[in-house]
Image (spheres, rainbow, N blue to C red):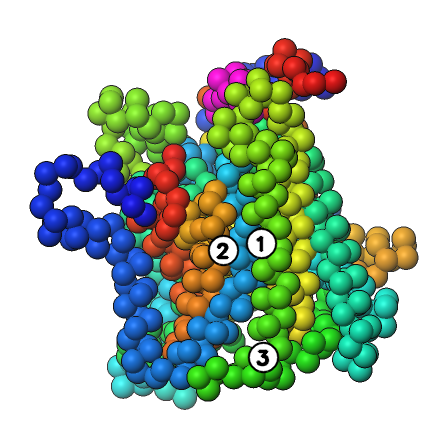
Amino acid sequence: MSTAVASLRTNAANVRRLLPNWVWALVFIVLAILYPTIINAMVSAPDDLLDASIQTLAYVIMALGLNIVVGFAGLLDLGYVAFYAIGAFVVGWLGSQQFADVNGGNGIHVLVPGQGLSGPTPGIHINFFFVIFIAATFTALWGVILGAPTLRLRGDYLAIVTLAFGEIVPRVFENSTSGIFGIGSTDFSNGRQGITPIDKINLPWSNTPFSSLDLEKYYYVGLAMLVLVIFFNIRLRDSRLGRAWIAVREDEVAAAAMGVNLVRTKLWAYAIGAALGGFAGVFLGSVNNTVNVDQFEFGLSVFILCMVIIGGMGNIWGVILGAVVLSMMNRFGLPKLNGVPEKFGLDFDVTSVNFGIFGFFLLVMMVLRPEGFIPSGRRKLELREAEIDEADHIGAESDRQVYEVRQA
Amino acid sequence: MEAASIPETPAGVPPRNRAAQWVGENILWVLLGAGLVVFFVQDPKQTLDDVKTGLSNGTIWALIALGYTLVYGIIELINFAHGEVFMIGSFVSVSIWGTLGATDQTGLGAVVGAIIVGLVIAMICTGALNAMIERVAYRPLRNAPKLAPLITAIGMSFILQNVGLLWRPTPDSAPDLIGSQADYFSIFGVPIEHSDVFAVIITVPLLVALVWFVGGTRHGKAMRATAQDPDAARLMGIDVDRTISLTFVLGGLLAGAAGMIYALYNGTIQFNQGFTAGLIAFTAAVMGGIGNLKGAVVGGLIIGVIQSISDTHYGQVWTPAVVFAILILVMVFRPQGLFGEETREG
């Protein structure tokens, strides 16, 4: 199998070399822009597919954010959903009627159509394109706050602490129906019902919000956000900070000895990773028209981690591929398979066990191909190097014979 | 506790500083103790009742926490799927009672028989399941970086949770075989319920048996040797792979027993009970010092008490957040736990 993969990779590399990188980038962008037109022409029910694609764009952004923390900086974060939750709640607060009492019930409006049928709409309403950056800043701040206590932890302890944060954040939102921790009396979340409806996206220079039936517009907003994020990711990866992340991931002590500031480097990873989570959270909150605590379960953190791992930790293109494949499968592929278990006399929906299926992928991938489909070259070397280094670790198959001195 | 502080204390430090240092190092325990005293002074009867509920509930966490601590002690892996093994234990025992036709109307002798059969079969199933998990998900990754088996563990946990989801899609009720809400007797005005007595009666013999097994048998000795130094253990003729499997079996047996007790103690079982229970029990294991058997039991009891006090004073909605906050505090400020020694993570 490995030779087949190797030859495939050589062929792929040869094809890639036919054209310079910027041409490839252009080709993909043009394809992405034409995508709604293409599926309109080719598929009989394009709305389903387009809806799944819109969700996918948001998941790709989240996967890229998590990739910064897990792939670049090597900090296993199992609570990434917390940042999605914070971002989504920011749009819930700044783009709905949640705080109906502000400004004497007249509401605050920034570049949004402010007049309802009966006078000004109450609540805070800020244009979506400002909210995404407000939310990104706010979640980045929370990334630092939640990341700071974990700086001294490594490996599995770090993973569990981030998991605990990921569980605490949604619960805090859920229970903050009358102030937070009993302070104040503002309702921040409507409890389990969540905040709904969320303002529709409208362009800052236009006064008409997108209709919820007009999926193409949402798609283009998401695509623009994604292109921005990919550009940002590539520039970051090659920057001084990006190289510092990789150095910290490979060997913390050596990195520190070379003058890398560990605290600052790790906190930047948390902050930027979190900011992208918030970025995607605002978009999803707005698209789904509701912000609801049930959306932010642990399974989602693992789902996004699964995208990063299956695609190839640390490789931007791999992560994008992983996210597109898994998210499209989740939103579009699995529902199509719902009838299959019935044919075998089983009574359940495939969609209800989606996390089990992704868990299975995670397991198989980790055992058979831990570096992912499109591995980052460095990351792969690290994984292999660890294998060589720890060859004398417990239970190694290779040295089992040598030590076999058991009594017969 | 003492063992951890001795090497850090220079010989000539005056006693007053040493006391301050002790408080500094044990600030979490000092705060928890102080909190308990404050609550006790405010409302002695309620607090005693909470402590009772917490201790009997804590025995379940202790049994699960032992599984985490046994496995972590031997291969330094957080067996993330352990909570799900516990859930399967609950499911198996309830199914067994369904098959046997045991209900709350069944006579005493038959009930005792049904409980024993349910306990034994649940334990066998979970023990085998845990060993299988090790074989499928962890053994192929012995040489991989440490995070790889953690990720497969998460995958395994999701698979099992979905098996549970298919098995019982909605919360199910267990037959009330022990009349769990009925009072036996009361001490200082605190009623002791059937369920409290039941949890203790099942747990204590298991703990004694475990201590005997780990401390007093050849296999236990092999486990301790492997935990200390796997390579040296292999050189001494210990079959390390088999010892690790045995450890997983032991952890699984205890999780199965915990699952059976949980089903009768709480009366309801559902497919996602394992996730929360697993995290709570893991908190308990870390609190007691992961890798330390005594620590896991004490940690389980402490977490049980913290939960029941939090239920009373802050409401049940906040209790999970309280437990997770404690998990974070312990892992960040005292990763070696109550009885543990400095870990590599610290």
**Which residue is at the far front?**
B216
Instruction: Give the residue number, with chain letter if any, for mark 1.
Output: B207
* Mark 1 and mark 2: Cα distance apart in space: 9 Å
CB under 8 Å between discs 2 and 3? no
From the image, tell me which residue sits under label 2: B297
Chain letter for the residue marked with disc 1 in the picture: B
Q: Which chain carries label 3?
A: B
Q: Looking at the picture, does residue A107 appear above or below residue B345? A: below
Determine the residue positioned at 84% across, 54% down: A341
Determine whether, in the image, residue B323 is placed left or right of residue B225: left
Q: Closer to the N terminus: mark 1 or mark 2?
A: 1
What residue sits right under mark 3 in the picture? B193
Q: Which sits in the foreground, A274 or B176?
A: B176
Q: Which of B217 and B77 is in front in this view?
A: B217
* Position above or below: A405 against A200: above
Residues rendered magenta in the picture: A379-394
